[in-house]
Amino acid sequence: MIDRIASGFHPFVIPFVFGMVFVIGWCILALVRILFQLTHQDRLAFFKSLVNPKTALRNIKDIFANCLLHVKLWKRNKLLGYMHSSIAFGWFMLIVLGHLEVFIYVPHRINLFYYPIFFNYFVSEADATIGGSLLFFLMDFFLLMVLSGIVLAMVKRFRSMLFGMRRTTRPAFLDRIGLWALWMIFPLRWIAETFTAHISGGSFLTAPMSHLLVRVLGDNIPVMPFWWAYSIALCVFICVLPFTRYRHIPAEMLLIPRRNAGLKIRNARKGLAKVEVFSCPNCGVCIDACPMSVKKANIKDCTVYLNRQIRRGNEKRIEQISDKCLLCGKCEAVCQVGVQGPTIRVAQRSIRKYGLSQDYSNIDIQPLVDAAKGSKVVYFAGCMTKLTPRISTAMESLFKKAGVEYVWMDRDGGLCCGRPMLTAGRLEQAGQMIAMNERIIKESGAGTLVLSCPICYKMFKEHYNLPGVKIVHHTEYLEELVRSGVLKLEKGDTFYVYHDPCELGRGSGIYEAPRKLVGQAAMIVDAGHTREERSCGGGSLGSLTLSFAQREAITKASLADLGVNHPDAIATACPLCLATFSRYSSRPVRDIAEIVDIQSNGSE
Amino acid sequence: MKENVVIIGGGVAGLEAARQLLSLGYMPIVVERKKSLGGHVAQWNRLFPDMTPTKDLMERLIADTAQANIFTETGIRFINRLKDGYNVMLTNGVNIYSKAVLIATGFGLFDARKKEEYGYGVYDHVITNADLEQWFNGKEDNRIPESPQSIGFVHCVGSRDVKSCNSQCSKVCCMTAVKQAIELKEKFPQAEIYCFYMDLRLFGKKYEDFYISAQKDYGIHFIRGRVSEVSERLEGRLQVKSEDTLSGKPLKVGIDLLVLMSGMVARDENSEIASMLRIQTDSDGFLKSRDNIYSIIESERPGIFFAGACTGTKTVPETVAEARAAALEIHNYLSR
């Protein structure tokens, strides 16, 4: 393989070089800006994580798996996964192999960064390099891979259902330009390389066509226009990249190390949140996932549109979208980038200034402190359980059956766990609740805190500092009692479908304990969508503005999905889900505590 | 040969309409789903404002309709629309041709278990207005203590409550609560009685007098504020949490017996009947009248008439008046 052009330069590379300089400059600028937006500790933590070999390794692994192979998309839909990974990984391999070629054959050109991209133009095949056919083959193979991905992308524009997507986003004007440029790059490269394959060599994709062309046209092959077009297409794509959905390519590579460094969203517009918003590829997977999208009017309130509005700085819409969300977390669960939609919204809510700032810290909790003393187990039912006494009655009965000595901490009125304040962005008030509840529990001397409400559970787990106290949801607690033989379950013949409450499943990762309990106490069938994919029942406290009528549609859709396998009854593990479903369900709705209570005997 | 008129429902509306149609020279055929006639009203003990024993009213209605053709424990299998009338097939196999059909299917009683925060079906001493009337009628109820010290009434249970999927007012419960509170006070003079209400809608003749008397003569406490939650204390007593919105203070009251004023809701069967006859249900689930001022008893289909609470919540006098009006309208329709 030898240089064909002595200077190693041709004007057609200028567009590409211009684009690359521009985009690299932009990336560096953005990186510096975002680094400055982080708090001092966060910045320090980020830099430390970069030099820590463990996180560094994880960063590389995650970038490889998510940015190139799109592992999460494969799990979602095979075709969608193949489409993305064929383009991303194929392109990556073309770049890597291009560099390898330069390195092997013309090492003195390695300093010209456009050389690997236009390698086939600048070299001609010499007899000595025939052995490089493996490289040629690989280059053509990965080009074919990318081309197949592009074909799928074109099909997807018109038939998104084939890729498991009912609804997708409408691309903005610049997005369309970027899209067309991306679609053009590889066909043009293919044609350009084919036209020069009789000089530079090629493999199965380029060589046969080249032979044919030479035979028909002789030396009159119009080579230059296609190399120019290839370079221009690259330039257009790279230049619009920072202003289109394709910005997620560099942004995601930045997001992964930050997340691995353990940074948290502190501001809806700055730092990590900004990287997340820019990492959003606008794919629209969250539209189908969002429980609110059962009503067409709510489609524009999904996370993908929140990200778009934040980028555009449309304050009114940002506020509307942030307030409306149920905070069920499904968009985050299905997002292949993992944009923390709910967290960004809560951060946004916390910016708001309220006219009235309540102070709860002067509530006299001494009676509650005194009442909670003297037991190993503290039971905290929570406000929602107070409204669904079936659950607390069942829990009391079960404590009795199991012979557990316990104190019901909020039997005679208690304090809120603070989560409604937290989701409303009123962090100060939430902090007051936390401090008071922490005092009650710490002074009780209990070693276990049992909660019936997943909303409280998540709050206690994540925002309370209770060293030495085991915090469990009642499903975990009951499962433990059954496993250790303290409670004995008799299998009934009712067929239940289990609804994963958002805060227990996606929110706290508890999927197995409830299923085990239901499975041991009764028969169990699956819902249409389960676990991470389960839709909110519509009752969520997360939304500040969603009207009752709009919630009704969500509840009914969720119920319909629960009924696909014709269960006799619905089981859930959240008082709010219980109350919401009971309103519209034609089937009985029961909490797992109730089911266990009906089907159990104490060990004595 | 007298002309048939099919009446669906053997409650106050159906029976009164049958009585009038008989005297107009028709043969009413009353189809009642239940074993006994009289519907919800027959389960009641006494009716306000004159404390009329329901038994008297029922006996009179049933005696006056003895000539009518009455099928109890019978439903409608299907109704076919013919050219100028309806072919009604009953579940007992009887097939009737009738030019006019009167729908008098009434209302459903709200299932108080749906308002779980009040503890009906969970706690030992929570009953509904209907349970209390049964007890007045002499039926045993061990949820009612021997000598309660304090009794609570919760108004608007499942009425005017979008969260219970019923936004309509049930009209009669305010007055029923006042009546039942007085009756309980007469039985348990030592008990303190609290009524938790959000509005008192005492619109009818003598209702206001009843309310004043309940306060002045019986010392019943009316607290303006909805009950937020009910819990059961260790000793079995109930604790009711509410807010006295007039003084702006939260309240906790210990209660020995809690009576929930279950409201009237649209029957689930309404949509079935509506689709059979190709008439419409309204947004509240009740059957839709042609208009709500001048033609409440008429449907949008010729020959289909309504009477009573199938088109919305009604008091007994309103139901009786509608039944008579419907009978006359049917007579006019048939003698065209």
Image: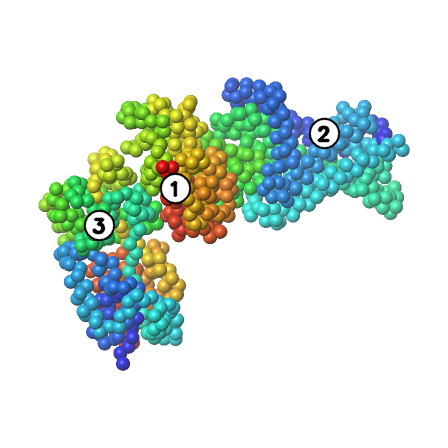
Q: Which mark is residue A17?
A: 2
Q: Residue drawn 42% across and 23% down?
A: A468
Q: Residue drawn 50% across and 28% down?
A: A265
* Side (left or right) of B218 relative to A127: left
Q: Helix, strand or loop at disc 1? A: strand
Chain under callout 3 = B
Task: Tell me residue A551's x, y (percent).
Answer: 41, 45
Q: Is B161 rendered above or below residue B32?
A: above
Would you say residue B179 is visible in this rendering?
Answer: yes
**Is disc 3 in the same subunit as disc 1?**
no
Q: Is A6 rendered above or below residue A81?
A: above
Chain under callout 1 = A
In this figure, which residue is indicated by the disc labeled 3? B141
* Side (left or right) of B119 relative to A238: left
Task: Tell me residue A122's x, y (percent).
Answer: 81, 32
In this figure, which residue is indicated by the disc labeled 1? A600
Q: Quadrant of residue A168?
A: top right
Q: Residue drawn 39% across and 47% down?
A: A589
Q: Helix, strand or loop at disc 2? A: helix
Query: Do residues under tags 2 and 1 come within 8 Å of each other at their CB atoms?
Result: no
Chain under callout 2 = A
Q: Amino acid at mark 1?
A: Ser
- In the rendered image, the quadrant that contains the C terminus of chain A is top left
